[in-house]
Amino acid sequence: MTTGLISSAAPSWAAADTPSAVAAPASEMEMPEPPTAEEARAELDELTVAPEDDVPGYSRSQFPHWINQHGTCDTREVVLQRDGADVTQDDQCRAVSGHWVSPYDGVAFDAAGQLDIDHVVPLKEAWRSGAAAWTTEDRKAFANDLVHSQLIAVSARSNRSKSDKDPANWQPPLAGYRCTYGRAWISVKHVYGLAVDPAERSALEGMLDTCA
C-alpha cells in the first residue's frame, strides 16, 4: 500500500458542505471497468501467493463505511444511483425508485432496499490477505472505493450466499459474469497489494479462461 494509492481512492471532490442538489461527479456515473483478461493475467502473475491465515481481530468496524461522498450522499447511495436505471433520489439522497439488475444472478429489482452493495473482495477476505496490517484510514478507503471495480449493487440473496468467500469457494451463479468478476477481483487485489492463496489463484485462472 502506498499513500498515492489510498489518496486516489478518496474522491477529491468530496466535501461536507456540497449542496445535495449538485449532480454527482461524472466519475461516479459508471462502474469502473476492470482490466482486460490479458491485463488481469499479468496482474495475477504479480500477486503474492501465500497460505491464508484467519488473522484475529477482524470486525466490519475496522473498515468504516458507508462514508459521505458528496452532499447528503453516502457510498451506498452513490452506487445505487450508478448501477441502476431511472433512479430517483429524495432530498436525503435515498433511492426511492429505479430499476436494477443484479449482475451476479440476473435478478431484477424495483426497490433499492432489496439490494446489497457488495465488496467484490470482501472485507474479511481483505483482512486476512493483508489489510490487517493497514491503518483504519487505509481500510476506510478500501471499503468505500468508487475508483476501482470494488463496489457493485447486487441481490441481497447473492451477496449473503457469497459472504466472505473467495473465488475458490464462491463464484457468481450467472456464469456469463464470471469473467468480469474474476478480472475485478484480481484488479482490486493488485491495486491494494493483497495476497492470494493457491486455491484462489487457480480459481481465478479458471475464471479468466471463460473470457471470450
Image (cartoon, rainbow, N blue to C red):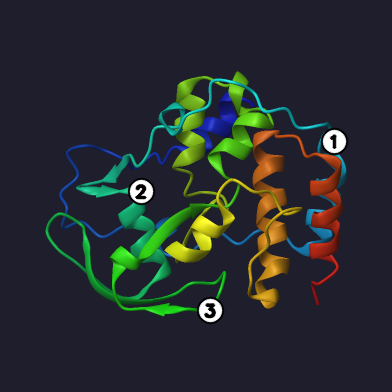
Quadrant into which the N terminus falls? top right
Q: Is residue 25 visible?
A: no
> Quadrant of the rendered structure where residue 105 is?
bottom right
- How far, Cα to Cα, is label 2 from label 3? 23 Å
Among numbered discs 2 and 1, the one appearing first in the sequence: 1
Among numbered discs 2 and 3, the one appearing first in the sequence: 2
Q: Residue type at mark 2?
A: Thr
At a point 50% along the width and 58% down the height, the residue shown is 159
* Front in this rendered view, residue 1 or 153: 153
Measured from the top left, where is residue 212 in percent x and y?
81, 77
At a point 86% along the width and 68% down the height, the residue shown is 209
Numbered disc in front, either 2 or 1: 1
At a point 39% along the width and 65% down the height, the residue shown is 82
Residue, disc 1: 49
Residue, disc 3: 106
Residue, disc 2: 75
Q: Secondary structure at mark 1?
A: loop
- How far, Cα to Cα, is label 3 from label 1? 32 Å
Q: Secondary structure at mark 2?
A: helix
The vertical placement of 52 against 174, above or below, is above
Numbered disc in front, either 2 or 3: 3
- How far, Cα to Cα, is label 2 from label 1? 31 Å
Residue 22 falls left or right of residue 63: left
Measured from the top left, where is residue 191 in percent x and y?
66, 40
Q: Is residue 140 visible?
A: yes
Residue density around tag 2, few if under 14, some if 14–19, many if 20 or more, within 10 Å: some
Q: Residue type at mark 1?
A: Val
